[in-house]
Amino acid sequence: MKKGIVVCIMLSFVLMWSASTFSNEYDFRRTNWGMSREEVAKVEDALELQNGSLLSPYGQYETKVAGLDCYINYYYTGDKLTRAEYEFSYEATLEYICTNNYEHLKGRLVQKYGKAVEDKDIWIDDLYQDDANNWGKAVTQNQLLRYAQWETPNTRITIILAGDEYGDIALKIKYRSQQIRELEEEFTAKEILEVF
C-alpha cells in the first residue's frame, strides 16, 4: 500500500515536471522573442504580405483576429524578433464602430491575461465625454485616446485606440519583449564593433 502511494506521488511529480518542461508557451502567436525572421516565417500561417529583408525592420502578414481583419507586423532588432502588433483594418476603425471593437478586443485580452495593470481613457477635450455614443467621433477628432496594458514575465501587451489630426483612427494591439533593451543594446554593440 505504501509503495503504491509513493509511486503515485512520484508519478504526479514526473507528470507535472514534464507538462511544465514541454509546454509551448509563446510570447506572440506561435513565436517567441529572439526568433529569427526565417523561424517566424516557418511558424506563421497567415497570408504573408511583406517579408522584411535584413535591411527592413519588419515582416507583415494579413489575418483575422476576434473576427476583425488586421495586419500582423513583426519587428526585428538585427535578426531577432523584439516586437509584434495587430494593426486593425480601416473597416474596424470606422468612427461608429471603433469604440465597440476596442471594447470587444480588450475583453478578449482580459479573458486571456486577466485585469489590465493600466486602463485609461485620456480626454484632450471633454466635449463628448458624457456621451458614449459619440466617443468614436471624439477619437476621430483626436479628443480621446484609449489604452490598456498587461504584463507577463516576457511581454508587455498594449491595446490602443487613437486618432490623429487628419481624422484617421488607429486600433492596435502591441506586444513588446520585456527584455527588448538588452536585445537592442546587444545589436547596437555588434553594429559598432563591425564598423571598426
Image: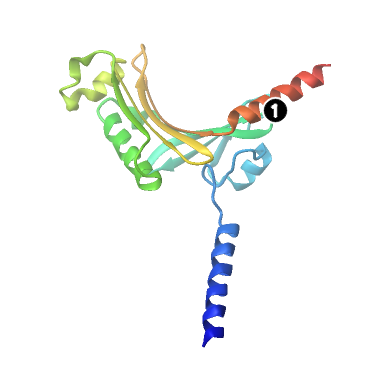
Q: What residue type is labelled 1?
A: Glu
Q: Is residue 109 above or below residue 125?
A: below
Q: Nearer the viewer, residue 126 or 49?
A: 126
Q: Nearer the viewer, residue 123 or 68?
A: 123
Q: In this view, does 89 lie above or below 66?
A: above
Q: Is residue 125 left or right of residue 148?
A: left
Colouring convention used in this rendered image of the protein: rainbow
**Residue lying farthest right?**
196
Query: Residue 173's image quarter?
Result: top left
**At which x and y percent is residue 154?**
54, 40
Q: Quadrant of the C terminus?
A: top right
Kindly state the secondary structure of the residue where label 1 is placed.
helix
Q: Count neighbours of disc 1 (C-alpha within 10 A) and say few if under 14, some if 14 to 19, many if 20 or more.
A: few
Q: Is residue 170 visible?
A: yes
**Residue lying farthest bottom?**
1
**At which x and y percent is residue 75?**
58, 30
Q: Name the residue under label 1.
A: 186
Q: In this view, does 132 lie to the left or right of 159?
A: left
Q: Is residue 172 left or right of residue 3?
A: left
**Residue lying farthest left?**
130
Residue at 66% across, 34% down: 80
**At which x and y percent is residue 34?**
64, 38
Residue at 70% across, 22% down: 188
Q: Nearer the viewer, residue 180 or 55?
A: 180
**At which x and y percent is residue 89?**
40, 31
Q: Can residue 50 be seen in this view?
A: no
Q: How many marks?
A: 1
